[in-house]
Image (spheres, rainbow, N blue to C red):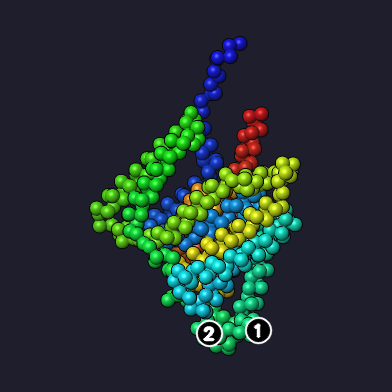
Amino acid sequence: MDENIKITPPEISLGKKVKTILTHNMVTVFFIVLCVIGFYYSGLSFGFLVNDIITRMIRNSFLVLALLLPVMAGMGLNFAIVLGAMCAQAAVIFVTHWGIVGLPGIGVTVLLTTPLAILLGYLTGRLFNKTKGQEMIGGMILGFFSNGIYQLIFLIMIGGVIPFYNETLVLSSGVGLRTTIDLAGGLRYAIDDFWRLPFTIAGMGFGVLVIAHGIFRYMKGIPSLGQEPGKKKYVFSGASGIALIGWLIYVRGSESVINMISVPMLTAILIGLMCVFTTYFIRTKLGQDFRTVGQDRHIADVSGIHADKTRLMAMIMSTVFASWGHIIFLQNLGTFSTYGSHEQIGFYSVAALLIGGASVTNAKISHALLGTLLFHTLFIVSPLAGRNLFGDAQLGEYFRVFVAYGVIGVSLVMHAWRKQLENKRRLSQQ
């Protein structure tokens, strides 16, 4: 037999390609359709939607990105990031009490938050190492338990056991904090207002970065230049950047409301740095250890990797990143519920990640950012769409509750369904 004869694989039909794409991305496609329908029936203008989405992306993206490392290490969806949020809120409360404002206040908040987040991340990691396979439910229960301790401290001990004299923050009885804390004049917009650019200018800069990224990957041969999928990615990257820049040039020449939108650049840069860190961390020795442990703990042990220590490190890093992300969240919000702002952080972040196409075993930066975009788009349009469709404002609020909680269940069911379809396809090919 001639060894020079090349055996070409049979071509896949367009229908099968489309079916494969839809099967692999059914969760994301489903929520894209919901967003389009919701936007149509909401009656919102495109400019208003863009402005609200930018605000919510800036506010929430860092928190969702904090979920990636535990998934990579095989620990599933980390509902325990609520502990990091509690650390951030505690630090924000004390910095507000001391009257430290602006970026110096943010710096002090980070210094107070980080050691506490490391401690709680370590304790959480120790717990998860004792409950392997049950990390997600363990994280949820741990969040409820920690919330009880948090409320004991700030509702009973502050002003009672712990001296705390501040008429603005403490209840009239002198014991316990008020239910709402206003950050105006203190940490509110401390990061966001440091540097702002018009959306069109910031978008053009982002388009240039997208094009440069595609060219860089092409020049470096990432992936191999001989691979057709790699070439398609380069072309898509360049075309997307050019299309974005062209659209924004058109918008700048018009009287669109979009020209009035500004982007907090320092916050956007922090989110970008988080993405860059995650990308390059995966390529380090510790990042590869995370992947190995996540794929198979037995193989990791045989390879000389201490699985428990690796999982512990993943949980510490995730908790610290979650605490930093919650600081960004609070300064952007400007006011927060003392006893409630942290409670839904885990649910919202996990829901956003799942909508982006992630699963309990696989999560990427693209999943986090796309999921945050889709989740909050649906969160914006669903109440108004429900009211306009059914003529009842209460039904609109029901839609909001459905989005907040139902998407987690729907996403997990659809991911399980997709896994069954993939298993059936493998069996049929054998």
The residue closer to the viewer here, 383 or 138, is 138
- Residue 171 visible in the picture: no
Judge whether 299 appears above or below 103 on screen: above
Label 2, label 1: how many angstroms apart (C-alpha)? 15 Å
The residue depicted at 68 percent of the width and 58 percent of the height is 125
* Residue topped by disc 1: 161
* Residue type at tag 2: Asn
Residue 391 position, x and y percent, is: 43, 64
Q: Is residue 151 left or right of residue 336?
A: right
Q: Which element is circle 2 on?
A: loop
Question: Picture quarter containing residue 66?
Answer: bottom right
The residue closer to the viewer here, 241 or 33, is 241
Judge whether 195 appears above or below 94 on screen: above
Residue 282 position, x and y percent, is: 57, 46
Give the number of marks: 2
Image quarter in which the C terminus is found: top right
Q: Which is more N-terminal, label 1 or label 2?
A: 1
* Residue topped by disc 2: 166
Q: Residues within 10 Å of mark 1 (few under 14, many from 20)?
A: few
- Residue 71 visible in the picture: yes
The residue depicted at 66 percent of the width and 73 percent of the height is 149
The residue depicted at 39 percent of the width and 54 percent of the height is 40
Residue 196 position, x and y percent, is: 36, 62
Judge whether 167 appears above or below 391 on screen: below
Q: Which element is circle 1 on?
A: loop
Q: Residue furthest top?
A: 1
* Residue type at tag 1: Val
Q: Residue furthest bottom?
A: 173
Residue 89 position, x and y percent, is: 55, 71
Q: Residues within 10 Å of mark 2 (few under 14, many from 20)?
A: few
The residue depicted at 25 percent of the width and 54 percent of the height is 254
Q: Is residue 306 left or right of residue 245?
A: right
